[in-house]
Image (cartoon, helix red, strand yellow):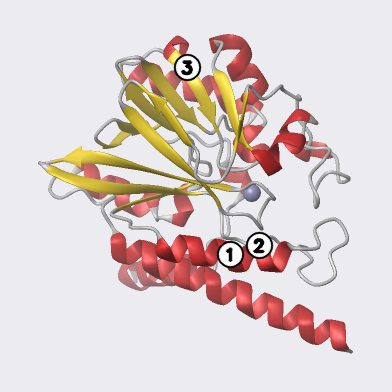
Amino acid sequence: MLRKLAIATALSLLAAPAIAASDYEVPFAAHHVIANIYFVGTKGQANYLITTPAGNILVNSGLETTVPMTKESIAKLGFKYGDTKILLISHAHFDHDAGSALVVKETGAKYDVMDSDVAVVESGGKNDFNYGDKGGENLYPAVKVDRVLHDGDTVSLGGTVLTAHKTPGHTKGCTTWTMKVKDGGKTLDVVIVGSPNVNPGYVLVGNKKYPGIAQDYEKTFQVLKSLPVDVFLGAHGAYYGMDAKYPKMTAGGANVFIDPAGYKAYIANREAAFRKELAKQQAGAKL
Ligand SMILES: [Zn+2]
């Protein structure tokens, strides 16, 4: 029965990696991922601390309400929240950037954001093509961006270099981060997937606020399929099955976050979902 449940859970994860919003504020154990990368997010939302001798980089600020959890996670791992020098995001949606104003205020970190997400961040979500007029949790404190990133730009601190790959569609400036790490004498490619997902209600055909959305998703899947990946991470733990992998990590043995096959399967699954939704909307548009 348990095994059946485990299989069903694994299958449902593969079929529809839906992120339960209720999990955003559920704490999750802070943990070491690989090399100088640490998970400091929650059950439903992934923040990463990348430590360097010159201070640290935080990828994703999470919700305003989860910033204290991030602080606690950083402290538990033995690092200082105040050492956060650079703040990056996966994309300009509240679950990844609503806490940014607070993090910037408390740490003085520089906020580096992909060009096409800057207007959204600086308007506190009001400029988002899909959620800007929906209010509620989609809106958050606006914050000024310190550095506007462009596709292929790098962010460097204390010997660590992250590359910003523009993977638009989910948001106009959705960003997939890559970096190289050394592990056991090998150099490994790490990816933090920005989001390849078509959210419920997204208009792919005839979208007046985002006319190029379908072409952008096409480009994104080309980029994601071309990246060399050993270590598979993403904007939500559900992308890479964090819940299932983390307990195996603590049990010792091989690093379970090294999962090139899992990455390929995830991207293929998400591309199929995009194509299915696009075909559905195109058929609907012809009626
Ligand atoms: Zn999102």
The residue sitting at the bottom extreme is 287
Asked whether the beta carbons under mark 2 and mark 1 sit within 8 Å of each other, the answer is yes
On whether ligand 1 comes within 8 Å of the CB at mark 3, the answer is no
Label 2 vs label 3, nearer the camera: 2
Q: Position of residue 142 (x, y in %)?
A: 76, 25
Is 253 in front, or is 280?
280
User: Please, is residue 10 above or below residue 39 in the view?
Assistant: below
Left or right of 135, for residue 62: left
Identify the image quadrant of residue 80: top left
How many circles with numbers are drawn on the protein?
3
* Type of amino acid at the residue the image marks with label 2: Asp
**Residue picked out by circle 2:** 216
User: Please, is residue 264 above or below residue 35 in the view?
Assistant: below
Query: Could you tell me how far apart the alpha carbons at marks 3 and 1 are, in whole angstroms?
Result: 31 Å
Give residue 270's mark.
none
**Residue at 23 percent of width and 49 percent of height:** 248
**Residue at 73 percent of width and 82 percent of height:** 280
**Residue picked out by circle 3:** 85
Q: Position of residue 235 (x, y in %)?
A: 51, 46
Crowd band around label 3 with a 10 angstrom C-alpha radius: few (<14), some (14–19), many (20+): some
Is 18 in front, or is 281?
281
Left or right of 193, for residue 63: right
Identify the image quadrant of residue 196: bottom right
Query: Could you tell me how far apart the alpha carbons at marks 2 and 3 are, in whole angstroms?
Result: 31 Å
Crowd band around label 2 with a 10 angstrom C-alpha radius: few (<14), some (14–19), many (20+): some
Left or right of 176, for residue 91: right
User: Please, is residue 155 above or below residue 233 in the view?
Assistant: above
- Tell me if residue 6 can be seen: yes
Give residue 219's mark.
1
